[in-house]
Amino acid sequence: MRRRDANGVTISDVAAAAGVSRQTVSNVLNRPARVAPETAERVRRAIDELGYRPNRAAQNLRERASRCIGLKIPAPIGVSNFLDRFLYSLTVAAGTAGYHLLLFAPAAVDEELATYEDLIRTGTVDGFVVADVSARDRRLPWFAERRIPFVCFGRPWGQEDGPYTWVDVDGAYGIEQGVEHLVGRGHRRIAYLGWPEGTGFGDERRRGWERTMARHGLDTGGLIGVCAEGVAVAAEAAERLLARPEPPTAFVCGSDTHAVGARLAGGLDAQGRPHVEVVGFDDSPAATLISPRMSSIRQPLDEVARRVVSLLTTRVQGSDSPPEGVMLRPELVARE
Amino acid sequence: MRRRDANGVTISDVAAAAGVSRQTVSNVLNRPARVAPETAERVRRAIDELGYRPNRAAQNLRERASRCIGLKIPAPIGVSNFLDRFLYSLTVAAGTAGYHLLLFAPAAVDEELATYEDLIRTGTVDGFVVADVSARDRRLPWFAERRIPFVCFGRPWGQEDGPYTWVDVDGAYGIEQGVEHLVGRGHRRIAYLGWPEGTGFGDERRRGWERTMARHGLDTGGLIGVCAEGVAVAAEAAERLLARPEPPTAFVCGSDTHAVGARLAGGLDAQGRPHVEVVGFDDSPAATLISPRMSSIRQPLDEVARRVVSLLTTRVQGSDSPPEGVMLRPELVARE
DNA sequence: GGTGGCAATTTGAACGATCAAATCGCACCG
DNA sequence: CGGTGCGATTTGATCGTTCAAATTGCCACC
């Protein structure tokens, strides 16, 4: 029994069974037009009978491609299951494009670049999705220099029109929808609660609030709160705003964590209705688990994943496509 | 320029540069003892200078192994980022064992088995981690029949001593620690809030509560609440218990979601201290985000991942190891 | 009946690594 | 001085696939 496990049927076995050469079998699968219909039919029957499946390693070797997309999985420090959801969308999108997602975690921070390089040089992956782009991310020029295919989820802030390809969601637009929603429900003193200055996406979301308030001629003075991500600190920050002489009646928030904090700070009335209306960002489970459920701005992760995969696969397949930035729109999920 | 990208240095290039045969280069990397020290040194220098890295596809073809572990990523319906954390631990564990994690998501439910089969038959993965074992999971006998290597995270309930290999965490022990903790703090009426009968792990956790209460001679009558996972329903269930004539003063819970519900139902006193003490399960971010922070039972995910990978790799490498069940102990993280 | 053209199919080589067996060089010994 | 033994190294074959070029068979046409 020489390694005759579940595996073991090769293209030659099929060829022999169908009475053709191995190349004809290959053609049936890859270039059906080249094969006479009745031959193709005979070969297909043999394939089915033997349960033949082409060996991936052999294909990879021949094609010089792994059909794998590499993704660094960050240490789980986050609070939302954002990565969970993106990972799922990305896996599905990759799958329909004929790719697989390959996860890796560098042993140490200073080994990170070496790990990327290794995966490419050994041909383990064809390219990367970079989901945690930071400002002035040193990986991006490093990849570009080595002509390593990659696509960012998240803008390379400050270089949106630069040499990198990315897909991102327009946070300002999302917050704008949130403000519009609250204005439509009669609110005038709408506060913003989010991250301190410095995170690209956070700043953008805040600007979305500012500009929408301005368009409606609403004052933003004393209505901004900033704090790190965390329910407790967010609740404190919200309380400070609520303690002011003209307190906000509603909040738009940079994240669902901030939003949960705002809701806790606001409290509920006797009927169990929140004193302040809150719109979160990310539509994480927290938004639906809190009671009553909370409106939140949902990022179109499926679409993001599809675009990322599509951009990456064209780049992997060698066409020297120009850099491209794709901006998608989030959507307000209004609840209650 | 024939495909001379970042890639392209082969073992023959190194051999030529070092003035040896390609097999000697291979030996330097895989069987160093066979090579004379000065030759090895010369080869190693050539490897460094050329930046040689062995091609993975060629190795895979020759070795008949992909060094990839397949993992089905479930649709993200959960509330915790449990998968996030396990995925990370698993990626790290796989990495140190020389493997990579390959994610996939079957297009449709009825294609699930076909997807597994395909991945094995094409040699895309060497085996699977099954992280979502259900009672009477039809995949397990199906895998076994085909001699497809796999290891479960989670017991195959009812067949713990059966033909399958698994790693799991002793939920009853964990809950026991929680009850002990609460007893130690003077509580006598300790309620259990968890899933309705039917989930293997949920039932086990409840039994842990029952047996520990019994050991302390404490009555469990009217102290059990069950509901689906969800903060709102959990809060309602907890309220019902709290409304009874002899209400519980503390809760141990089947999940952090249940625990958050219990905490919300209990409410805070004037000093911001919870009226009821609560111990959750999973030590998810929710436990630390709620204010004040909550005790919770932490599963040793790093250890689980290491054991899973270790069991799987020995099975992949062909040794017909007998089935094995590994039970690990969770740990109470006491807070406040 | 020979020739050209075309579709269908086959053959040989290659992708880059590793294993098994063969070969080489050298010291040792009878 | 030739044979033996042994460590170090090389050669040839192989893993399973696909590309490029060669071959085959068939028909139409002059």
Image (tube, coloured by chain):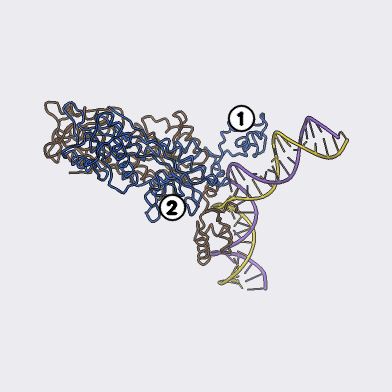
Chain colours: A brown, B blue, C purple, D yellow
Q: In which quadrant is the C terminus of chain B drawn?
A: top left
Relative to B71, is A36 on the left or the right?
Answer: right
Q: Is residue B331 visible?
A: yes
Confirm whether circles 2 and 1 share one chain: yes
Which residue occupies the foreground of this view, A156 or B199?
A: B199
| Residue placed under numbered mark 1 in the picture | B45
Rendering coords of residue D28 (x, y %):
55, 72
Mark 1 nearby-residue class (10 Å; few <14, some 14–19, many ≥20) = some
| Residue placed under numbered mark 2 in the picture | B115
Which residue occupies the foreground of this view, A292 or A153?
A: A292
Estimate the spatial distance between the alpha carbons at disc 2 and disc 1, rounded to whole Å.
44 Å
Disc 2 is placed on an element classified as: helix
**Mark closest to the chain's N terminus, 2 or 1:** 1
Res B246 quadrant in image? top left
Res A165 quadrant in image? top left
Relative to B187, is A119 on the left or the right?
Answer: right
Res C30 quadrant in image? top right
Q: In which quadrant is the N terminus of chain B drawn?
A: top right
Rendering coords of residue B288 (x, y %):
29, 31
The furthest residue to the front: B217
Rendering coords of residue B295 (x, y %):
29, 32
Count the numbered circles shown: 2
Q: Is residue A310 visible?
A: no
Q: Is residue A11 above or below residue B1?
A: below
Rendering coords of residue B180 (x, y %):
31, 32
Checking the image for residue B184, the label placed there is none
Mark 2 nearby-residue class (10 Å; few <14, some 14–19, many ≥20) = some
- Amino acid under label 2? Thr
